[in-house]
Image (cartoon, helix red, strand yellow):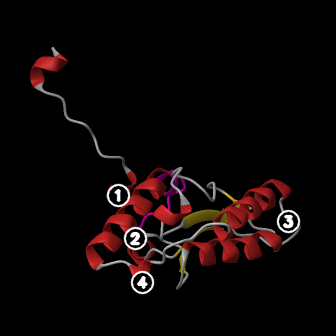
């Protein structure tokens, strides 16, 4: 079963099957690592977005929740992500003012939008589609 693990409350409410982690991005990674040890597989990279850990207080990871043997590829990726986050000074959502927190939550949501749409995880089907770019009429001719 597909499941989103996130500390982003806004995204949590928009997704069909998700678990909200109260805490930092590192807390999300550690929780996902536990699930990978139990047999879950990563569906999205735990460091997606190419943002430095101290610039990303929200972390969302899509998994295929299973029980069984640990997937070695997933385990390697999540262990490396945890190691990177543990080596950095990270910010937590609670440390930010409301406006900045909302901006970071939006970035996290946008980074996950395509993957969540691909796996049919969004509650509102209209959210699944990426926004369309409208071109001026003369460009089309």
Other-residue count near label 4 (Cα within 10 Å), few / some / many at <14 / 14–19 / ≥20: few
Q: Residue at x 61, y 73 (%)?
A: 26
The numbered disc on residue 14 is 2
Q: CA distance from mark 3 to mark 4?
A: 33 Å
If you read the primary sequence from the N terminus, does the residue marked by circle 3 or circle 2 appear first?
A: 2
Compared with 93, 72 (above or below) is above
Select label 3 or label 2 by which is in front.
Answer: 3
Q: Which residue does the numbered mark 1 point to in the structure image? A: 127
Q: CA distance from mark 1 to mark 2?
A: 9 Å
Residues in magenta, as a range: 115-123
The residue closer to the viewer here, 50 or 108, is 50
Q: Which residue does the numbered mark 3 point to in the structure image? A: 70
Other-residue count near label 1 (Cα within 10 Å), few / some / many at <14 / 14–19 / ≥20: some
If you read the primary sequence from the N terminus, does the residue marked by circle 4 or circle 1 appear first?
A: 4
Name the outermost residue toward the top: 141
Q: Residue at x 67, y 67 (%)?
A: 87
Q: Is residue 72 left or right of residue 36?
A: right
Q: Which residue does the numbered mark 4 point to in the structure image? A: 94
The numbered disc on residue 56 is none
Select label 4 or label 1 by which is in front.
Answer: 4
Other-residue count near label 2 (Cα within 10 Å), few / some / many at <14 / 14–19 / ≥20: some
Asked whether the residues under the numbered discs 2 and 4 touch, taking CB atoms below 8 Å apart as contact, a structural biologist would say: no
Select label 3 or label 4 by which is in front.
Answer: 4
SS for tag 3? loop
Q: CA distance from mark 4 to mark 1?
A: 27 Å
If you read the primary sequence from the N terminus, does the residue marked by circle 2 or circle 4 appear first?
A: 2
């Amino acid at each position: 079963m597909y499941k989103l693990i996130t500390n982003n409350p806004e995204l949590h409410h928009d997704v069909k099957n998700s678990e909200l982690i109260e805490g930092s991005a590192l807390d999300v990674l550690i929780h996902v690592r536990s699930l990978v040890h139990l047999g879950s597989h990563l569906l999205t990279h735990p460091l997606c977005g190419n943002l430095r850990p101290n610039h990303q207080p929200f972390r969302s990871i899509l998994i295929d929740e299973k029980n069984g043997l640990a997937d070695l590829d997933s385990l390697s990726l999540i262990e490396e992500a945890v190691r990177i986050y543990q080596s950095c000074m990270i910010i937590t959502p609670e440390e930010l003012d409301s406006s900045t927190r909302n901006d970071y939550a939006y970035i996290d949501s946008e980074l996950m939008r395509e993957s969540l749409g691909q796996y049919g995880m969004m509650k509102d089907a209209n959210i699944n589609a990426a926004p369309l770019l409208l071109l001026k009429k003369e460009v089309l001719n």
